[in-house]
Amino acid sequence: MSDNDNRAGCAVCRLIRIYLMVAVPLIIAMALGPELDFLKEIDLTKVAAAFAVLGLALTVAWRAYQEYWRK
């Protein structure tokens, strides 16, 4: 085995991987249609706010665990 097998990859390879994981699914979603029927009934602002509050609560709980209960 060489040292190159243990590394995550070069910067260009990482950029290509990120592009494939983010941009390609986005392009496919746009090609399928501008509106998705199952999203019509959902208020995305409330969903985003709920995720933000959940993330804040989890972060505070994790920091409290690290500070007070972790030995």
Image: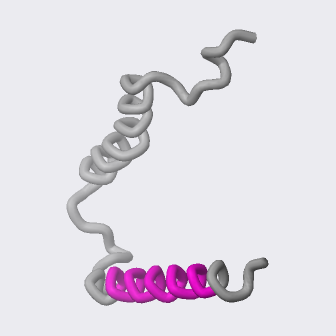
| SS assignment for the magenta stretch, majority | helix
Q: In this view, does 45 lie to the left or right of 4?
A: left
Residue under the point 37% across and 23% down: 12
User: Does residue 17 show up magenta in the picture?
Assistant: no
Please state if 62 lies on the left or on the right of 16 as rendered: right
x, y percentage for residue 18? Answer: 40, 39
- Outermost residue, top direction? 2
Which of 52 and 6 lies nearest the eye of the viewer?
A: 6
10 w.r.t. 27: above or below = above
| Towards the viewer: 2 or 71 | 71
Tell me: 50 left or right of 36. right
Which of the 4 quarters of the picture holds residue 43? bottom left
Question: Where on the picture, by quarter, is residue 8?
Answer: top right
Q: In this view, does 25 lie above or below 55?
A: above
How far from the left and from the top, in percent, is residue 38? 38, 76
**Percent coordinates x, y for residue 64 in the rendering:** 60, 87
Horizontal side of residue 58 vs 15, given as left or right = right
Q: Position of residue 11 (x, y in %)?
A: 39, 26
Q: What is the quadrant of residue 68 in the picture?
A: bottom right
Which residue appears farthest toward the left when viewing the image? Answer: 34
Marker count (numbered): 0
User: Residue at position x 31%, y 49% from top?
Assistant: 26
Image: magenta residue range: 47-64
* Residue at horizontal 36 percent and vertical 46 percent from the top: 22
